[in-house]
Image (spheres, coloured by chain):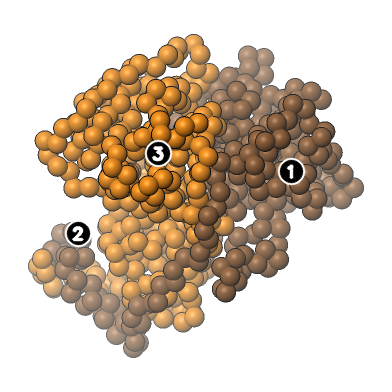
Chain colours: A brown, B orange
Amino acid sequence: MLHIVACIKQVPDTKIIKMNPKTNTMDRASAPAILNPYDAHAVEEAVRLKKRYGGTVSVLTMGPPPAVKAIKKCIEIGADEGYMISDRAFAGADTLATSYALTKAIEKISQIQPVDLIICGKMTIDGDTGQVGPGIARRLDMPPLTSVNKVKEINIEEGYAVVHRKLEDGYEVIQSTMPCLMSVEKEINDVPYSSMTNMLKAARYQPVIWAVADLEDVERTQLGLKGSPTIVSKVWAPTKPSGGEMLEGDAVQQTEKLLNLLLEKKELFAVKGGSGVEL
Amino acid sequence: MSFEDYSGIWVFIEVKDGEIVPVSLELLGAGKELADKRGTELAGVLIGENVTHLADTLYEYGADTVYVYDDTIFKNYRTESYMKALLECCQKHKPEVILYGATSTGKDLASAVATDLPTGLTADSTILDIEKDTGLLLASRPAFGGNIMATILCKKYRPQMATVRPKVMKALTPEPGRRGQLIEETASIKEEDIRTKVLEIVQFTTQKVRIDEADIVVAGGKGLGSEKGFQVVHDLAETLGAAVGASRDVVEAGWVEHHHQVGQTGLTVTPKIYFAIGISGAIQHIVGMQNSGLIIAINNDPEAPIFQSSHYGIVGDAFEIVPLLIQQFKQVFNGEVVDHV
């Protein structure tokens, strides 16, 4: 029986987020808090593996109290248990400090039930780094398998997993001993609509919430802002381009203008008769 | 930790199918600027099997020193073996900065190395600078889905590390015959200690033109309405011998596969010509294509932000405009306009 821990995060929906043009800061209130989309795929994959091989799916998050909502979303997807670490001491953590805190929580979860597999989303849409997953793997001394877009096989008896790992121009098939950590790409699965049963379960569900004091062997200097080697020194809005020339006229005139402009730019668009485009 | 012990700018040299991956040469270009500013040397760390001869190319692209780990154990990239080699190299020679390409390999390796050292790691940087006197690396990157730019510092740890997106930095013009120092290293790794095996490597052959290497990219967005509507993008791309790009929405809708996605969570592209058809121009998309040579936007909404980021804009119905363009290009290619070179 597999015990899979999926690490998740509640994030602002960066597609919708608005910027304050005066201060160059984000108006977080303008964006709804959602389950990080990559993490939804991580939880879905964990649930699929549970269906294939039997077992339990636990989800783990670090965040402020409202992040309970993200755990409930995971219960809707089909996770069995939810754990949250929530404490002011975690605030301001970069990826290194985050992976440390999550590792301490996973160590505690594994005392309840040993962990065979950890699954994370490829990255979060607010941090965009993809570093927390591999960080947890290294701290727990597990092989990190990043960019996984297919779990081909899990062999519980012999203790190994075979996955497809996405590359720029294809993929590689990797066999790894278990326990291991996978961070998964979106294309690994589709997250279907939740069942009514899971939705009802999620509505009633209350996760286990731990503060720093509930975790063991924690070095407080490795947490939060203190434990973060990176700091953000400056934030600014990307320069807004001023826009170029609009081509006027009807469709035929517009396209002819464009074509002539391209042909004039010889260095950009050199056309040789009949041989197609050569640049 | 005494910072005085740490010096030199390093670039992790990624090798694929026996060749240096372009981003590594781009990073030598960026690293050279940092090294010159600090008055220190630029080094490449070359790991692989039968790779030592590649050092000559690295010198020509700016490396003063090349640390090489050439062994069958490094035949395929594996986190544990490469990480061990790089960690040992770091502990021995103490660099001030290490740069990695933000590729699947570079990101995987950098994340592991950063945790074990430990040190700070800035992901997907697009701008690099260094303080001349302190050696503090100023790595800037788009954050929050590209909504803001942030400069990240690592003040308390060395080495400072960053992954850098391909196609953002420029490689130097190679200087033929430029030489450097080769330092051959061996890592204390045994095959039995490595817990992963690469069983197979599968390369896509269906992808005609790689979007991040193409000279022309024709990209389409959700404005085209449907997978069927998106066909105009394929048609124009075929006429021009271009690669097909897409916005995130289009990929999420499943009209094309993820390797066509341009933008923050997709690929950065720098073609000579970029067509944005039916793409509204969310900032996440813009950060992936803004360094294209010439950007042409076609959209029926005159208020679409994409027009702010384009050199030429056409307000109109893509289903009318694009077929006309295809027809006109075909006429040009059939010899009616010849030899503009």
**Number of numbered discs:** 3
| Cα distance in 3D space between marks 1 and 3 | 30 Å
Q: In which quarter of the image is residue A20?
A: bottom right
Letter of the chain that mark 1 sits on in the rendering: A
Q: How crowded is mark 1: few (under 14 residues within 10 Å), some or many (20 or more)?
A: some
Residue that mark 2 sits on? A279
Is residue A198 depicted above or below B282 in this figure?
above
Q: Residue A89 carries which label?
A: 1
Q: Earlier in the sequence, mark 1 or mark 2?
A: 1
Is residue B240 depicted above or below A170 in this figure?
below
Q: Is residue B318 left or right of residue A214?
A: left
Residue B209 percent coordinates (x, y): 32, 50
Q: Which mark is residue B97?
A: 3
Q: In this view, does A200 lie to the left or right of B211?
A: right
Q: Is mark 2 on a helix, strand or loop?
A: loop
| Cα distance in 3D space between marks 1 and 2 | 56 Å
Q: In this view, does B303 lie to the left or right of B13?
A: right
Q: Which is more toward the observer, B157 or B220?
A: B157
Residue A268 percent coordinates (x, y): 21, 65
Letter of the chain that mark 2 sits on in the rendering: A
Letter of the chain that mark 3 sits on in the rendering: B
Residue found farthest to the bottom: A249
Residue A235 percent coordinates (x, y): 53, 60
Give the amino acid type for the residue marked by disc 1 in the picture: Ala
